[in-house]
Image: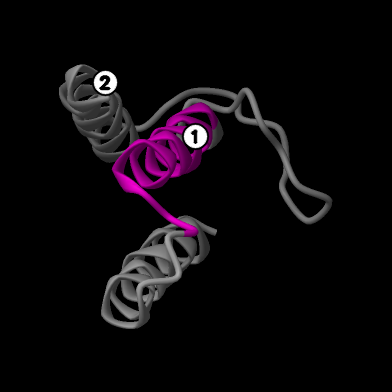
Amino acid sequence: VVLGFLELALALKFLSNVDLAYHWNWLDREVFLALWIAIFGMLGLYLIGKIRFAHDSPLQHLSVTRTILAVTVFAFVVYMVPGM
């Protein structure tokens, strides 16, 4: 699931490159950053167990690795907010 969120974010990055090359002006900087903030915010919520999908079991506790990854993702989201 984490790699799925990363794949969505990177697909937007490559779509942004095509958008810049062909001058479509669909994904300007603010839209791109807003979508990345939303994607990584949802990834952070998934990592702490607030968002669950159909195949996920409920989390009894957070592992150290998952907690560190969630903190890193939320720090990245906070880092991107001033760029808007």
Label 2, residues with CA under 10 Å away: few <14, some 14-19, many ≥20: few
In the rendered image, the quadrant that contains the C terminus is top left
For the residue pair 41 and 83, the one nearer the viewer reads as 83
Q: What is the quadrant of the N terminus in the image?
A: bottom right
Is 59 on the left-hand or right-hand side of 69? right
Is disc 1 in contact with disc 2, using a CB cutoff of under 8 Å? no
CA neighbours of label 1 inside 10 A, class few (<14), some (14 to 19), many (20+): some
The main secondary structure of the magenta stretch is helix
Q: On screen, 54 above or below 10? A: above
Q: What numbered label is drawn on residue 81?
A: 2
- Residue stretch in magenta: 26-45
Q: Residue at x 29, y 24 (%)?
A: 74
- Residue 29 coordinates in the image, percent (x, y): 30, 44
Secondary structure of the residue carrying tag 1 is helix
Give the distance between the C-alpha atoms of the residues marked 1 and 2, in whole angstroms: 11 Å
Q: Nearer the viewer, residue 51 or 18?
A: 18
- Quadrant of the image occupied by residue 21: bottom left
Disc number at residue 4?
none
Q: Is residue 46 left or right of residue 36?
A: right
> In the rendered structure, which disc, 1 or 2, sits on the residue that comes first in sequence?
1
Amino acid type indicated by mark 1: Ala
The amino acid on which the numbered mark 2 sits, given as a three-letter code, is Val
Q: Which residue is mark 1?
A: 38
Magenta run includes residue 31: yes
